[in-house]
Image (tube, grey):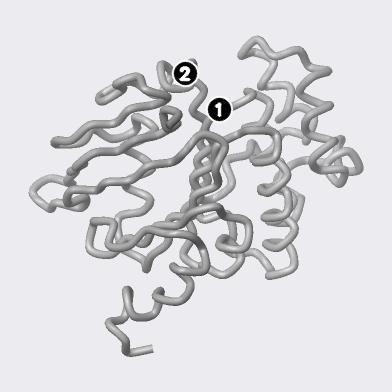
Amino acid sequence: MSVPILDIIDLHAAYGRIEVLRGVNLTVPKGAVVALLGPNGAGKSTLLKVISGQMQQTSGDIHLAGIHVTGAKPDDLARLGLTTIPEGRSVFPNLTVEENLLLMSYAGVAPEAVFDTAYSYFPRLHERRFQLAGTMSGGEQQMLAMARALASDPALLLLDELSMGLAPLIVDELYETVAKIAETGVSILVVEQFARTALRVSDYAAVMTGGTVVATGEPDEINAIMADVILGGAA
């Protein structure tokens, strides 16, 4: 069996005295798309912050491609191939699309490679390349955030609430791109409150409630038990 790209073991984290993650166990196999589902307040975004080094855990272990990275800084994790697209579309609104993309060249990626990657996945960005990012639609800004992340050639991509504030048709389009990205061998952990679209492109799924993972399995299995797991059968 190959070493998973991400292995989380008995992870705990807290905001002050309030424990938010309570013994999370989660594995992302290499080359797989894993959907992390659950209601608001389940701890999903906090888990991504700990994985990406933005927040320290109180106990537990994280391994990235077999390397123990517990407590590692974000820049060290980036060098190991971890890239995060946070909730809320992190683009520079007063820069054009191309200027946003060119920022990635400061990380050592050739501008031509950045543009090729961005425009091959998102042709609409080529049409908008001289437009200020802040004047684009929410869906186009999300495309730009994803294009910038892909320019770093990630081994593991963390996506936080890709669908937030977007129309269903745009969400479907973005998840089609997620599937294409996965076909190139990039491993993906996608946090999503609205499960159905994420499950369609996922190889595996996990459900969080109350700061811990309460169910894991293949998409059909998880889809069948989602309401019972989250609502205790009240749905």
Mark 1 sits on what residue?
Answer: 155
Give the SS element for disc 2: loop
Q: In terms of sequence position, does the residue under pointer 1 or pointer 2 come before the other?
A: 2
Q: Which residue in the rendered view is the most extreme toward the right?
A: 127
Q: Quadrant of residue 129?
A: top right
Residues at circles 1 and 2 in contact by the CB criterion of under 8 Å: yes
Number of residues whose C-alpha sits closer than 10 Å to that of mark 1, classed few (under 14), some (14–19) or many (20 or more): many
Query: Residue 125 shows which numbered tag?
Result: none
Q: Amino acid at mark 2?
A: Leu
Task: Give amino acid for label 1.
Answer: Ala
Q: Is residue 134 above or below residue 31?
A: below
At a point 32% along the width and 74% down the height, the residue shown is 229
> Which labelled disc corresponds to residue 80?
2
Residue at 55% x, 47% y is 33
Relative vertical location of residue 77 with respect to residue 167 in this rendering, above or below: above
In-image side of 159 versus 227 (left or right): right
Question: Residue 31 location, x and y as percent?
Answer: 57, 36
**Quarter of the figure with the N terminus:** top left
Q: Is residue 168 above or below residue 26?
A: below
The residue most toward the bottom is 234
The answer for how far apart the CA atoms under marks 1 and 2 are is: 8 Å
Badge 2: residue crowd in 10 Å (few <14, some 14–19, many ≥20): some
Q: Quadrant of residue 174?
A: bottom right
> Would residue 93 be visible to someone looking at this image?
no
In this rendering, would 195 be left or right of 46? right
Which percent across, then down, holds residue 214?
Answer: 27, 62
Element assignment for label 1 = loop
Position in image of residue 58 (x %, y %): 14, 36
